[in-house]
């Protein structure tokens, strides 16, 4: 079964961020045989003076294919990890739900969290009403807002960027577009304007690619190099552009 796991507010200003903890949790779930990590996406939420956050107010969603005979272990494993590994002073939240059971109301909650100040009680009431597992684990439990929001945004399929996909962080130099599509979790390679990339084209992948989530797929956005003398045909969009996703 395919599950989404939302986590938020597990860090403090001195610790490793929530993205690091989300990637670690995904790796440990895979190593334990509970499930296979498909991707970890980062979702930027509203930045406002009335919202407490560590640095950027983002939340992380893990996309995991869980073994049917291990699904009952998923909650306890994630809960124990976050209680153990969340930084002192954090307000960690956890949301877990099967992919097929994310209701429209939670997708709308995620979209609202990008432009509206939301309250913890709103997240908790919505999750309870929809039968979605949502739990505060440390501090004042404020992370439940982001945990629920990122699950909704990931399921809606048109927000965020991936901080982990199969094979992506190991890439360097240049690779054929066809190789990237066959050996990594990247599903589409195209320009910002929508131009597709031929499978034989060389794509320079330094620094490591950050695919974005568009129309439910992991999309690597690229551009033509300005220097006509380089050997590659395409290069990654600048990081400052990708940060807008």
Image (cartoon, rainbow, N blue to C red):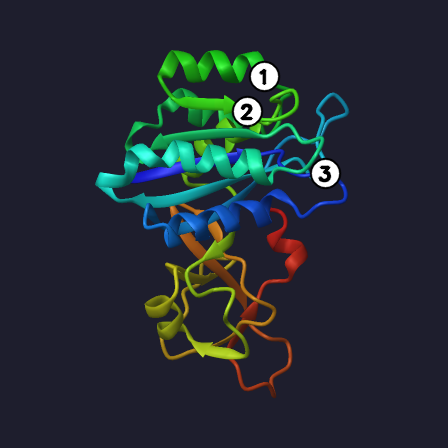
Q: Residue at x 56, y 26 (%)?
A: 137
CA distance separating discs 3 and 2: 16 Å
The residue under label 2 is 144
How far from the left and from the top, in percent, is residue 99? 32, 35
The residue under label 3 is 12
- Please tell me whether mark 1 sits on a helix, a strand or a loop: helix
Q: Residue at x 56, y 33 (%)?
A: 83
Compare marks 3 and 2 and give the one earlier in the sequence.
3
Q: In this rendering, which labeled residue sits more in front, label 3 or label 2?
A: 3
Mark 2–mark 1 CB contact (< 8 Å): yes
How far from the left and from the top, in percent, is residue 104? 37, 23
Res 120 quadrant in image: top right
Residue 125 sits above or below residue 19 on the image: above
Question: Quick one: label 2, few (<14), some, or many (20+) residues within 10 Å?
Answer: many
Q: In this rendering, which labeled residue sits more in front, label 3 or label 1?
A: 3
The label shown at residue 120 is: 1
Q: Residue at x 73, y 27 (%)?
A: 48
Question: Quick one: label 1, few (<14), some, or many (20+) residues within 10 Å?
Answer: some
Q: Is residue 133 left or right of residue 52?
A: left
Res 117 quadrant in image: top right
Compare marks 2 and 1 and give the one earlier in the sequence.
1
Q: Residue at x 50, y 15 (%)?
A: 124
């Amino acid at each position: 079964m395919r599950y989404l796991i939302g986590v938020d507010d597990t860090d403090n200003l001195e610790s490793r961020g929530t993205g690091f903890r989300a990637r670690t949790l995904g790796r440990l779930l895979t190593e334990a045989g509970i499930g296979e990590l498909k991707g970890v996406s980062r979702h930027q939420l509203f930045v406002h003076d009335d919202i407490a956050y560590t640095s950027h107010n983002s939340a992380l969603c893990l996309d995991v294919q869980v073994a049917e005979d291990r699904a009952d272990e998923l909650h306890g494993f994630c809960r124990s990890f976050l209680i153990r590994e969340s930084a002192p002073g954090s307000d960690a939240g956890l949301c877990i739900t099967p992919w097929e059971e994310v209701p429209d109301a939670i997708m709308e909650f995620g979209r609202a969290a990008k432009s509206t100040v939301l309250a913890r009680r709103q997240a908790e009431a919505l999750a309870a009403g929809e039968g979605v597992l949502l739990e505060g684990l440390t501090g004042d439990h404020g992370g439940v807002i982001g945990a629920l929001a990122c699950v909704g945004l990931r399921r809606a399929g048109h927000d965020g960027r991936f901080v982990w996909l199969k094979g992506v962080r190991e890439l360097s130099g240049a690779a054929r577009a066809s190789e990237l599509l066959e050996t990594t979790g990247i599903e589409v390679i195209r320009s910002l304007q929508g131009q597709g990339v031929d499978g034989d084209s060389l794509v320079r992948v330094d620094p490591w690619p950050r695919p974005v989530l568009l129309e439910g797929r992991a999309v690597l956005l690229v551009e033509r190099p300005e220097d006509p003398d380089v050997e590659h045909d395409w290069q990654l969009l600048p990081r400052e552009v990708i940060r807008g996703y």
